[in-house]
Image (tube, rainbow, N blue to C red):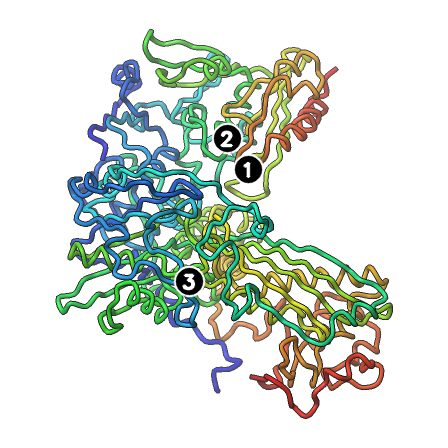
Amino acid sequence: MKAVGARLPRYDGIGHVTGRTQYVDDVRVGKTLWVKALRSPHHRARIVSLDVSKAEAVKGVHAVITHADVPKNVYGHLEGLGVPADEPLLAEDDVRYKGQPIVAVAAESEAAAYAAIEAIAVEFEELEPLFDMRKALDAEAPQIHQWGNVYPHYGPYNHRRVRKGDIDRAFDKADVVVQGVYRPQAIEQMPLETQVCLAVPEASGRLTIYSCTQAMYFSMGVVAAHLQVPLNKLKFVGGTVGGGFGGKVDTATDTICALLALKSRRPVKWRWTREEEMLASSTRAPWHIELQDAVTKDGWILGRRTLTLHDAGAYARFSPYGVTKHAFHHSGAYTIPNLRFDGFVVFTNRVPTTAMRGFGVTSVSFAVETHLNRVAEAIGIDPWELRLKNANRIGDTSGNGVVLKDPSTVPVTLAAAERVGVELPGSYRAMTSDPRTGELLPEHLVAQQKLNGEGAS
Amino acid sequence: MTDQVLVPTSADEAVSLYGSGEGLTVFAGGTILLPEIATGKLRPERALMLHKAGLDTIRTENGRTVIGAMVPVAALVDHPIDLLAQTARHVADAEVRRNATVGGNICAPPGPDAQRGDLAAPLMALGARVRSAGAGGERTEPIEDFLAGDRSGRLVLEVELDDVERRTAAAGLRRRHAHSYAVAAVVGAVRVDGSDLRLAAAGVAPTAVRLRAVEESRDAGDVLRDVQPVDDAVASAAYRSSILPKLVREVLDRLELK
Amino acid sequence: MKLIVNGIEQDVASPPLTPLLHVLRDELDITSPKAGCQQGGCGTCTVLVDGEPRRSCLTALAAVDGAEITTLEGLGGPDSLSPVQAAFYNHYAAQCGFCTPGMILAASHLIESHGRPLERDEVLEGLSGHYCRCTGYVKIVDAVLAASRGEATEIEDLPVAVPGEPEVQPKGSPA
């Protein structure tokens, strides 16, 4: 591993600094058509009627597609994992978020494409939207998804659960219970390169798709599934992305471009405007996280109850997976022997949400770390001591039963203190990740300790 | 695509081609029009481009400073009239300021998500007058009258200010980075003998607003009688209402009124 | 109309109101200026017009008829990097690279117009209209400061531990 520790030039560095790096929008293929989409102006509505005939007649228009043109219109990002499909590529009977695509066109010029969109006759019946995920479970809330307002496919449950130890006993034994509610909000990844795709029909009958995806094989699978074609019908070219940060996994453009390329028999390119990006591209989700910690006066966290609501927006996409990741991390980098976690994926009439830099985890890390400071304040203990005492150590088990063999909480916490100039007492600075003994192994942590590596992983 | 693009090579030709402005899109710096054209929202049929019409100079004559409508905002950043320079420095960033024009800024139509036309506030405080052409010929009027009137048929040619010694002050609330629209900004000017107090607020309404009630009473609280701030993507009306009196107070204090 | 792009005179047929960005990208196939927002907000479309950085997405073709346009391709190629290009390369100032063309052109002009080493604040202010979503700007500022000081540090010569980077001793992967 000669390269480890060495400074190496970026393989794309020269391309970047000379302006020669080729992004999807920089690829030049002759006779390329421009793509535009009709997007829902409403947060939630029934589509009463749709007539694209005038759009097809606009000068310069080569193809117009609706849901009827999609071999498999309704798809789910997690179908491969057994999660049922719920989202139409192009809207069929209703629209569930402002910006949802309904029709797409390919035309000789951007102006012709815009004109075609304007020529579409569509009638809506507006319906009452749901925006607040906390209201989603109320009986009187509008039911906005065919599964109801809560994702129901976590096995027999409608939520992701973690159960460890005896949570009621932990709360009985607590000296103090500290509560907190944490609501990190949606964030738009805002890559400088907007969503973009160039799809080229080849003479061989295959399709070449220049994609901005962060996940080439995944997106190939999405396109193949919608088109109902074998994977070898597609050739994906990509890997040069102008920023994604999680926002270019959902495969927002590739499928529609593929269909238009096939229908028009011409290369087609769809480059989203910045407005489309801000309106219709998937964001990091808003979360609602309620933590209740059962704590002793001397700073042991005996147990934690967690309720999480995750705003999936209008469709499921990766949200069930995000909440699962979130569940794995809800005890943070700390050993809490009694846990009760319930996490709900909730639908609202917002743009569907997706990954962004630490999908599912950053939200709970923020909540947990903020909460620990509250706990420290509530019991009058130094927040560094609270963390170092409860920190994961070798032989501790995580919330879902994983035996920890080399946790880094202690050395990283100590390094962080040093980095920010906090002088910790010598007894803290001497702490290591070694298995708990003596004062660091109170009665209530004995049962969760697995030193010879046994236990579920 | 635009069917007809007219490029006058003199101010007179511009006025003549403009006529009453009917069916014509005036194209100054393009910083507002080009993004709208790019997203298909605007498709001008006839455009009047002003970049060759000789409207891009700043001149001083007869005790006045005259700023042509096509003067780039960049040219005001280091101008000796400090109130203008301060406001200009906050418009977008250095690169956009090379394209944006004084006339375009003053005549900006209401923005969908943020308020525009910040330069009109210091111009109001400095007693500026707008010279415009259109149906009924040329006229010169105080900028607040120009903005309050029907300006859909007016072509701004230049803005003139009397070179009078004034004390000036500005206070604004905005994020500390480029391209920040102001949550609210207040500017003020007073002659050195204490007369002719003029105050204006920018960023809280579709155009800059003269604060006549405050000028009269010298009471910062009266600002909400002069302007009803709006809700937009930058700030709420409620928040603007709560900080405007504070900004007005700050400007009044700095003007050292007797 | 005519443009002199990177030293070469070009006759252009695009309509007069066409943004310079699209004349360059779509008529002349010069693709380093990017369509990041088409509203003048991001800086990825920046080119030099008669030596000054302007937003090409906000510049109508007719307004620059006859002007000299410089894009990143015109600043230097792989075997002839300008000092700023070399500094960006050596200091890892580009990750995805999308902001890089506009950033380098703006930085080059900033350095040239001052004609002396820059201060950090001057770089932050001078490049304040340019967004980067990847790097957090630190290495971009380092590169511009280094270039303004005439430093020609090669990658291998950069100090191993840059201040601010944590010293972590990995103990072997638990995975």
Q: Position of residue A169 (x, y in %)?
A: 79, 72
**B154 or B165, nearer to the observer:** B154
Circles 3 and 2: CB atoms closer than 8 Å: no
Report crowding for label 3: few under 14, some 14 to 19, many 20 or more residues within 10 A (C-alpha): many
- Viewer-nearest of discs 3 and 1: 1
Residues tagged by mark 3 and mark 1 found on one chain of the structure = no
**A152 or A290, nearer to the observer:** A152
Q: Position of residue C136 (x, y in %)?
A: 53, 58
- Helix, strand, or loop for circle 3? loop
- Viewer-nearest of discs 3 and 2: 2
Say whether residue C150 is visible. no
Q: Chain of mark 3?
A: C
Circles 1 and 2: CB atoms closer than 8 Å: yes
Circles 3 and 1: CB atoms closer than 8 Å: no
- Helix, strand, or loop for circle 1? loop
Amino acid at dot 2: Gln
Q: Chain of mark 1?
A: B
Say whether residue A385 is visible. yes
- Helix, strand, or loop for circle 2? loop
Q: Quadrant of the N terminus of chain C?
A: top left
Gap between marks 3 and 1, in whole Å? 30 Å
The tag on residue C96 is 3
- Give the vertical position of B178 relative to A439 (above or below): above
Gap between marks 1 and 2, in whole Å? 9 Å
Gap between marks 3 and 2, in whole Å? 33 Å
Q: Quadrant of residue B53?
A: top left
Q: Which residue is mark 1?
A: B234
Q: Quadrant of the C terminus of chain C?
A: bottom right
Amino acid at dot 1: Val
Residues tagged by mark 3 and mark 2 found on one chain of the structure = no
Q: Which residue is mark 2?
A: B115
